[in-house]
Amino acid sequence: MNSSILSILLTSVSIFVLNFAFYFTTVKYSKLSLQVSLILTTTLVIYLVLNGRAAVIGACANIVYVFFNHRKLFLPKKFILNAVVVFTAVLVVIAFSLKKDSSSGRILIYKVVFTQLKLVDYFSGLGIGKFKARYNQLQADYFEQGTQDAKEVLLAGNGYYLFNDWLQFALEIGVIGVLLICCFLILFFKIFTWQPHNNPILFAANGGLITISTAALFSYPLQVIATLFFFIFCAVIHIYSSYSIKAIHRHKYLPGILHAMVLSVTLLSIYYCSVVYQYKLKSKLAFELYRDGFKDEADAVFNELSFYKFSDYNTHYNYAYMLYFKNELNNALQEINKALDLAYSADGVKLKADILWELNNATEAEFFYKQTVYITPHRMLPKFNLLQFYIKTKELDKAKYWASDILKMPIKKPSPATDKMLNESIRNQLQIRI
C-alpha cells in the first residue's frame, strides 16, 4: 500500500477512535481542546512518518466537524468559524508547500485530462474503472503535440489516478456520475446540520467518513481496498444509526430492508476482499513459477486465473510476457490487450510494440513505440527503443532525428545503461551520415 494512502487509513481510524472516546467525556472547552490537540498530534506523527498530505487535510476537516458539533460551547460563533477556516487554510497551504513537485504533477494531470478529453467523454463517461486505461493515452497525445514546457516533461510519468476520487468517479460515469456525487454531497453536508445525541459510535463514524471523503479530493483512498472497506464500514454505521434515530423502525417494512442492506454490503465486501486476496496469491505464485523456470506449471496457474471475475494489469502483463518469450505471439497479443484495457502502462505498450514487430506489423508497432516515448517523455530508454526500431526498418531520417534527440537529453544520474545508449546513439548517427 502506498505510504500516502496508509497515512489516510491510519488517520481516519485514529480519528474514529478519538471521536468515540471523547464523546463519553464531559463536554467542556478544556476537553475539546485536548481532543483537537490529540487529533493534531496523531496526524502530525503520521505525516512525519509517512508524508501523507491528504491525511492532514482530512484531519483538518474532522476538526471543523468537531468544533461545529460542539458549537453551543462558544458564544462568538463568527470568531470560531473564522478561526477554524483560517487554521484549516494555513495547514492546507503548509501541506502543499512541503510537496511542491507532487502538487505540480497533479496540476499537469488535470491539464492533460481537461485539454485532451472530448465533449462526448464528459457526457458518456470513460467507463467504470477505465481512467487507468485512458489517462496515459491522453498524456501521450498531449506530449506528441509538442506544446509542453521542459518542467512538464520532467513531471510526466505513468499515471493511473486523477488524485481526486470524486472527480475521477464523475469522469468515469459521466453525467450520471455528477448527479450521484451531488446526491452524496447533499447527504454528506446534512451531517453538519444534525447533532447526534447519546450516540458516540455515530459521532466516530462521521469523523471517519469526513476524513476519508476530504482526503479523497486530493488522493485515491477509495480505490484501495483497505480504505474503501473502512469507508463502507463508517457509512453503514452512519446510515444505520441515522435511520434508527429518525424512528424508521416504526414503519413496517423499512427496518427489514435496512437490515438486509447492511448485511448484504457487509457480506459482499468480505466476499470481494477474499476473492481479490486469493487472486493476488495465485498471480504471485504464477509469476514465481515462471521466474524459477517452471513454465508449464506457471501456464496452468495463469489459465486458472482466467476463470476469476476479478483481474488486474500485472497478471495479464506477466502472462503476456511469458507467452511472448515462448513465441506464442497471438496469445501474447490477446493477453497484453487485456492488460492495457485495465491500465495503459508504458511497459505494457512497449511489450505490445515488440509483439507487433515480431508479427511483422511494423505500422502498428511504430505507433506503440512512439506512445511509450510520449507517455514518459523524460526517459531515454523509450527513445532509444524507437531509434533501434527505425534502424531495423531502415528509416534513416527518423533514426537520425531520434539519435540527435537522445544526445540532447540532460542526464540527471549518469549510469552504465545511459552511457551505453548515448554511445550507441553516437555510433548510429555516424553510420547514418556515412
Image (tube, rainbow, N blue to C red):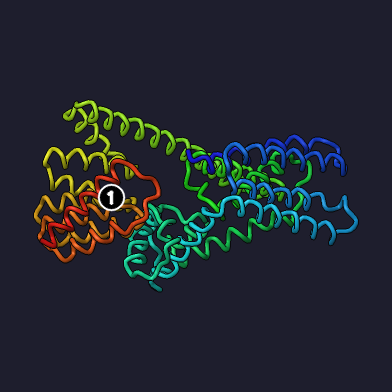
Q: Residue furthest bottom?
A: 119
Residue occupying the point 19% across, 62% down: 400
| Image-based side of 304 in relation to 225, left or right | left
Q: Residue shown at 32%/31% (left/top)?
A: 284
Q: Amino acid at mark 1?
A: Leu
Establish if 62 lies above or below 181.
Answer: above
Instruction: Residue at 73%, 48% (x, y): give it.
Output: 63
* Front residue of this view, candidates 25 and 159: 159
Quick check: can you spot residue 408?
Answer: yes
Instruction: Report whether 386 appears left or right of 92.
Output: left
On screen, residue 132 versus residue 216, left or right, reads: left
The structure residue drawn at horizontal position 46% and vertical position 62%, both measured from the top left corner, is 108
Residue 362 appears at what percent x and percent y? 13, 59
Total labels: the figure holds 1
Viewer-side residue, 426 vs 251: 426
Judging by the rendered image, the residue that carries numbered circle 1 is 381
Residue 403 drawn above or below residue 303: below
Residue 253 appears in view: no
Q: Quadrant of residue 244 in the image?
A: top right
Q: Is residue 414 above or below residue 138?
A: above
Q: Position of residue 420 (x, y in %)?
A: 24, 45
Q: Residues within 10 Å of mark 1 (few under 14, many from 20)?
A: some
Residue 121 x, y percent position in the rendering? 39, 68
Q: Residue furthest right?
A: 75
Q: Quadrant of residue 139?
A: bottom left
Secondary structure of the residue carrying numbered label 1: helix
